[in-house]
Amino acid sequence: MTEPAFSMGIEEEYLLVDLESYALAEAPDGLMKACVAKLEDQVSPEFLQCQIEIGTKVCADIGAAREDLKRLRNTVAEEAARFNLAPIAASCHPLADWKNQHHTDKDRYNSLQRDLGGVARRMLICGCHVHVGLDDDSLRADLMRQMAYFLPHLLALSTSSPFWQGQDTQMASYRISVFDNLPRTGLPPQFHNWQDFQRSVDVLVRLGVIEDSSKIWWDLRPSARFPTLETRIMDVSPRMEDTLALAALNQSLLRMLWRLRVKNQRWRIYEGFLIAENRWRAQRYGVTEGLIDFGRGEIVPFKELIDELLVLVEEDAGTLKCQQEVDHLRRIVANGTSATRQRKVLAAAKAEGQSHEDQMRAVVAHLVEEFHADL
């Protein structure tokens, strides 16, 4: 069997904040024009006017992805600074109220607002999507079923949205709670083959419910535009190196599953009900409380889980030349995700006697700093 390219592409959504107040700010026309002039179709507005989205080119390996993502982040940051703004790569703004935001006047977003009603208005959230190149439809369908097992692990490692409207939600990823209110979200159904997937999509297309599968927003889906599997469950990461580590893990996991397939083996398929329990644990706790190992029948601390996971993909990370990035995941587990770091900043500001609003502004200032840390 010919080995797929396992190429990758990374999409990230950012929020724009005012550098004086750290409040959300709408993207000025001049900012978008300047970004488009430099980045062309690799940058675009998002659903809300305070958001901006970037996407790397098709990258052969993690080294190319790092170079392109760094260029994209740098350009957005530099152009935003000309307007006294800064991007943050966190899935929720710690202080902002969704009721004060306006959606972008664009046909696709006007349609979403019309179709989704009040649910769409609450979409003050940002995510990170990783595409991995698999140019065979039957392979994409087969690996999607198996890859679903690892989606909670990826969510836990990416969590960056503990706050919502100035309150600590006690969640590591509140973004998931908001996004799950939309239709056609959550874990992907367990289609047995590509034909089953396509038949189900065609039913909704024929009824006029959706135009195509781009209106399906599962945590993992076959891309409607590219010959890829697109992992969508992750929060966006403030630090670029964390994003690259998660992208490398996506790539390595899919190669590991392909390698099993070549040997007539496969990852065990668990009921969505069970995987959803781990998804909830990742959403609630991030990497602090562990996930269920269904084979062992126990909750396993995340440090142990990540060690086992990295052994599992060691051969694949080596072949794909992303071992360094995959190893970075141990640092995330040891030091905590962005959700943990944000809470530490809040606690320090509180200990200094700052007002609650100033405490939240301190968190946003921290997120601005982290965006620039790896550039």
Image (cartoon, rainbow, N blue to C red):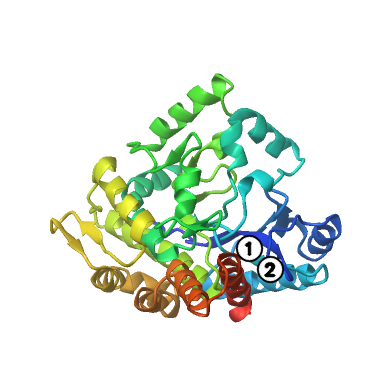
Q: Residue 206: image x %, image y %?
A: 55, 20
Q: Which amino acid does label 1 sit on?
A: Thr
Query: Viewed as shown, does residue 204 lie left or right of 40?
Result: left
- The quarter in which the N terminus is drawn is bottom left
Near-viewer residue (344 or 370): 344
Q: In this view, does 13 lie above or below 213?
A: below
Q: Which residue is drawn at 59% across and 33% down?
A: 118
How many angstroms separate mark 1 from mark 2 (CA)?
8 Å
Q: Residue 135: image x %, image y %?
A: 49, 50
Within 10 Å of the Cα at label 1, are there few (<14), some (14-19), or many (20+) other Cα atoms? Answer: many
Residue placed farthest to the left in the image?
A: 297
Mark 1 or mark 2: name the one nearer the start of the chain: 1
The dot on residue 72 is 2
Q: SS of the residue at dot 2?
A: helix
- Would you name the residue on which mark 1 appears? 56
Residue 231: tell me if it is visible.
no
Q: Residue 269: image x %, image y %?
A: 24, 46
Residue 373: tell me if it is visible.
yes
Q: Is residue 250 above or below residue 109?
A: below
- The quarter in which the C terminus is drawn is bottom right
